[in-house]
Image (tube, helix red, strand yellow):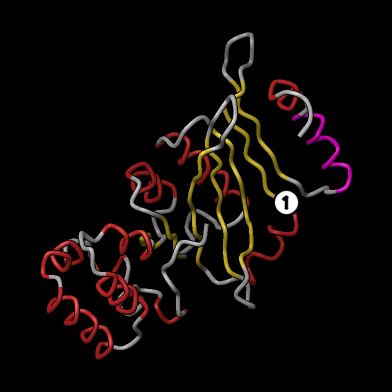
Amino acid sequence: MRGSFEYAYQLLTSCIAEVKLVELDFVFDIQTTSCKDKRFTGYFWCFGPSKKTYKLLRPVVVIDGTFLKGRYRGTLVTAIAIDPSNYIFLLAFLITDSETTKSWTYFLEMFGSNFYGYDTRFVVISDRNPKIINAVPKVFPFAIHTFCAFHRSNNIKTTLESTRIAFRMAAEALTSIDFDKYMNAIRNKNPVGLQYILGIPKETWSNLYIPMSRYVVTLYSLT
């Protein structure tokens, strides 16, 4: 609200020092270029309470990025979970130049070292960003990577909202009877949209077929 973008970035290390005074478990990592000017390229952080309580949450993590506005642009990457009361629980953050395989790999590695171990089985939900698709299995080979049903429904080539609704209902279905009912509704109304859906393995978007469906995971992105 006050000052310039340059001044705000200059205060970053001071801000971190102030946080560490009251939050001893605060984790951060600032990335800069290797040249003498030490140009800022990335900043990862997470808070102590999140690290202490994440094991009480569902074994499901939603990751996504959003563009920052301002002179220096960049991308804010987040990882969130859902607490027992179905509220969004923020886990970790990263500010980076752009979404690349390298930046996503770095974020997931930092996330893994502070939260889930690299040999832990849990669910990762994201959009179908190729950079994320490349990074997740490299960092978390035991994780189950699924795709956000909301994004998938918006990508269905149709002007019929009923088709998108039927797809979302199929994604949330917990019995084969319900799943087949909604898929048949799509087949009858929108064969083209059905072909798009069938091109994506149902194990990556359906509650019924995802390997950890017993946790009643709703595959919707929440960021």
> What is the count of numbered marks?
1
x 82%, y 42%: residue: 19
What span is colored magenta in the figure? 12-22
The residue most toward the right is: 21
Local crowd size for mark 1, using a 10 Å CA cut-off: few (<14), some (14–19), many (≥20): some
**Disc 1 on helix, strand or loop?**
loop
Q: Residue at x 51, y 39 (%)?
A: 67
Tell me the quarter of the picture where residue 71 sits.
Answer: top right
Q: Using residue 147 as the reference point, say whether residue 6 is left or right of it.
A: right
Extreme residue in the bottom direction: 177
Judge whether 110 appears above or below 84 on screen: above
Q: Is residue 50 above or below residue 219?
A: above
Q: Quadrant of the N terminus?
A: top right
Does residue 4 appear to the left or right of 92 in the view shown?
A: right
Magenta span: chief secondary structure: helix
Closer-to-camera residue (61/67):
67
**135 or 152: nearer the eye?**
152
Q: Is residue 144 magenta?
A: no
x and y percentages locating residue 180 in the rendered image: 21, 84
Residue 43 x %, y %: 63, 34
Report the front residue among 4 and 59. Answer: 4
Can you tell which quarter of the image residue 77 is in? Answer: top right
- The amino acid marked with disc number 1 is Phe
Q: Residue 17 magenta-drawn?
A: yes
Residue lying furthest top in this view? 36
Q: Nearer the viewer, residue 59 or 148?
A: 148
The vertical placement of 11 against 193, above or below, is above
Look at 12% across and 79% down and name the residue there: 188
Image location (x, y in percent) of residue 204: 31, 65
Image location of residue 168, percent across then percent down: 34, 73
Residue that carries the numbered disc 1 in the rendered image:
47
